[in-house]
Amino acid sequence: MNIILLSGGSGKRLWPLSNDVRSKQFIKLFKDDKGEYESMVQRVYRQITAVDADATVTIATGKSQVSAIRNQLNDKVAVCVEPCRRDTFPAIALAVAYLHDEKGVGLQEAVAVCPVDPYVSNSYYESVKKLGTLVEQGDANITLMGIEPTYPSEKYGYIIPMTSDSVSAVKEFKEKPDVSTAERYIEQGALWNAGVFAFKLGYLLEKVHSMIDFTDYRDLYAKYDTLEKISFDYAVVEKETDIQVLRYEGAWSDVGTWNMMAEVMADATQGNVILDNTCSNTNVVNELDIPILCMGCKNMVIAASCDGILVSDKESSSYMKPYVEKLGEDVRFAEKSWGSYTVIDAQSTSLTIKVTLHAGNQMKYHSHERRDEVWTVVEGTGRTIVDGMEQVVRPGDVVTIAAGCKHTLIADTDMSVIEVQVGSEISQADKTVFPL
C-alpha cells in the first residue's frame, strides 16, 4: 500500500510548544510501546507499519518541516517537498507525480491519502488498508473514509452515503454546517469527512494532467508557485460522480487544540513540574530547565518552552490562535536533520544558541558574511572544519570563526555546543552553503 501523509500547518493552537517549524505533529507528548516519548508523526508511522509492514509512506510537506521529519523518522519515509504552500490539491498532485516519476509506482497501484495528525487506534489504519483493497477492486474512482460522528460538529464537512452499509455509494457532500444543520445531517446517516481517501495512481495522475499543463514531476515542481490554491475536495472530490465511502466506527480525535490534546497526552505533567494536592484536571508541559509549581489550578493547561509560556483555562485555550499570531516572535527551538538548536539569549547584536548534534551527523559546510561565531564544546567529541582545516574538538575547546570563513561541525559522539553569534546583522538568510 502506498500512503501519502499530508503534513502542514503552523501549529499556532499548540503554542508555545509548536511554532512555524515545529508543528503539533512533532511535539513528543505520547509514549510508544516501550514507554518512550514520541511525537504524533512517530506514532502514526509506528501504527501504519504495525498494520502493514510493507506500506510505503511518503510525507508531503513544506520545506520548513523536512529537518524535523528527518530528525524523528530518519530515512524511513520518502519526503515530497512543496516549494511553497498551495493547499491540498496541489500538494497531492505533486505527491502523485513524485510517486510515479521519481519512485516508479505503477499506474494501477492504490494510493491512500491521510492527514498526519489524528489520534486513533490501529483499527483506523486497518481501515486505510481496506481502502486500498476497495480501490483495487475497482468499484469506484475514489474511496473515502467517513468517520462515524459523535456529536453535531461545526468543524467538519459531512458525507451523506446512499445506504447505511459499511461501504456505500456517496449521495452528496455538505460543507461545514451550523449545529442544528449538523444534527439533521447525522439523522440522515451522515459521516464526518476527515480528509482520508484512496484511488488508483493512474486515475488521479490523469485527472491532474487534465487540470494542469506539465510534463513530469520536476516540471510540476518548477511551476508549483503558479498553481491555484485549492483544496482536493473542491478540485476533485466534489466533481467526481463515482465515489464510495467506507464507514469507520472506531475512536478518532483531531487533537488540534490544547483542550483536546490534554485528553490524549501520555502524562498529565511532563518535565520539571509540581502540582499541589488541590490541583485538578490540569495538564502541564515544561520544556524549560527551571521548575513550574502549580497550586490550586483547576481545569487548566500550562505549557512552557523557550518560545513562551501559556497559562490558560482549558476551554479558552481553543481560541488562542489570533492572540499567538500577534506575538510574531522568531522561532527559538527547531529540530534539524542533524539534531536541534535552542536559542538561549537574543540581543540586537548577538545570539546565543545551544546546539545538539547526534553522533554521526554534521552541519552543512557554510559561511556567513555579516557575523562572527564562537563555538564552545560542552559535551561529546567531534571535528570542526574551518576553511578546509580539520581539528578534533573535545569538551572545553573553543573555536572562533570569522565572518566569511567556511565551517562545519562533525559529531563523532552526541555533542552539545554553545554557539555565540556576534554581528551587526544576525539573520538566517545570511548563509551560503558549499560542497564539502
Image (cartoon, rainbow, N blue to C red):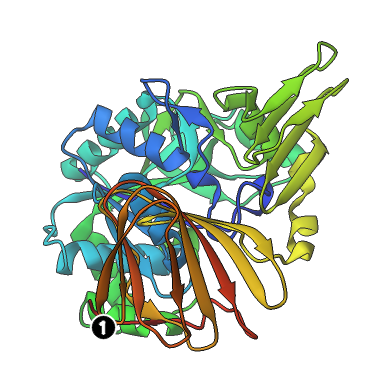
Residue visible at 85% across and 13% down in the picture: 278
Left or right: where does residue 52 sit relative to residue 222?
Answer: left
In the image, residue 428 above or below residue 328: below
| x and y percentages locating residue 171 in the rendered image | 46, 44
- Say which of 237 and 48 sits in front: 48
| x and y percentages locating residue 204 in the rendered image | 27, 62
**The N terminus, quarter of image:** top left
Q: Amino acid at mark 1?
A: Asp
| x and y percentages locating residue 339 in the rendered image | 40, 53
Q: Is residue 54 visible?
A: yes
Residue that protrudes farthest toward the top in the picture: 277
In the image, residue 94 above or below residue 129: below
Q: In this figure, which residue is indicated by the disc labeled 1?
A: 219
- Say which of 175 and 5 sits in front: 5
Task: Estimate how packed mark 1 is, as few (under 14), some (14 to 19) or many (20 or more) residues with alpha carbons within 10 Å.
Answer: few
Q: Which quadrant holds residue 255?
A: top right
Q: Is residue 152 visible?
A: no
**The C terminus, quarter of image:** bottom left
Query: For numbered disc 1, what is the local secondary structure?
Result: helix
In the image, residue 8 above or below residue 63: above
